[in-house]
Image (spheres, grey):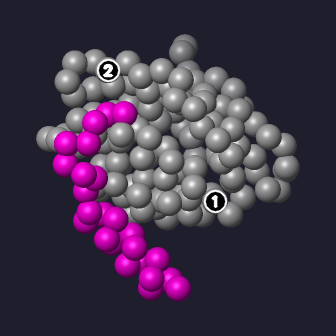
Amino acid sequence: MKSAFALLVVLAACHPPRSGETLTESVRSYNEGVRWQRYAVAATHVPPEQRSDFVDEADERSKDLKITDYEIVKVEQKGDSEAKVQVKVSWYLDSVGKLEETQAVQSWEKHGKTWLVVDESRLRGAEMPGLREPPTEE
């Protein structure tokens, strides 16, 4: 089983998303992949050098973290190659059993014809495992 999973990670790292995929298609594909634990699919929207770690970490978190829904709240495209996407995520931890809601901001960049999520952090709501906390203002 481990060797099959390792092969899946390697193939995901080598297989880019469809050429010319729109920002909206990329955002949906990434977030659907995360929601349904299809991490190899989601990883195609992460920079290539981060894909293997992304899949490993997401798979480890999924033992307790369950995402029940997501909603794309807002998309702000900045020119042709950058965008900020606000996503609302409903989730719970099996170990706790309490439904939580978190809003996150995803930073997307276009590399060639491919949109990649380069950062993701919590905007508001409950702290969520695997989601970076926003920088504190001092």
Image quadrant of residue 91? top right
Residue type at numbered disc 1: Ser
- Expressed as whole percent of the image width and height from the top left, the position of residue 121 reads 52, 32
Q: Along the polypeptide, which appears first: circle 2 or circle 1?
A: 1
Q: Is residue 125 above or below residue 18?
A: above
Q: Is residue 92 above or below residue 6?
A: above
The residue lying furthest to the left in this view is 112
Q: Secondary structure at mark 1?
A: loop
- Expressed as whole percent of the image width and height from the top left, the position of residue 19 reads 19, 48
The residue lying furthest to the top in this view is 138
Q: Are marks 2 and 1 in contact (CB under 8 Å)?
A: no
Instruction: Name the residue at 37% across, 33% down.
Output: 24
Number of other residues with Cα within 10 Å of mark 2, as a class: few under 14, some 14 to 19, many 20 or more: some
Image quadrant of residue 49? bottom left
Instruction: Name the magenta segment's main secondary structure.
Output: helix
Task: Residue under label 2, please give it.
Answer: 77
84 part of magenta stretch: no
Instruction: Name the residue at 72% across, 58% down.
Output: 64
Please state, as top left, top right, bottom left or bottom right, where the C terminus lies in the image: top right
The answer to whether 119 appears left or right of 67 in the picture is left
User: Which circle marks residue 62 in the picture?
Assistant: 1
Task: Give 137 or 81, whichever is nearer the viewer.
Answer: 81
Residue type at numbered disc 2: Gln
Q: Secondary structure at mark 2?
A: strand
Q: Specify whether residue 135 is in view.
A: no
The residue lying furthest to the right in this view is 97
Number of other residues with Cα within 10 Å of mark 1, as a class: few under 14, some 14 to 19, many 20 or more: some
Instruction: Name the residue at 43% across, 46% down.
Output: 30
- Expressed as whole percent of the image width and height from the top left, the position of residue 6 reads 42, 77
Q: Nearer the viewer, mark 2 or mark 1?
A: 2
The magenta stretch is: 1-24
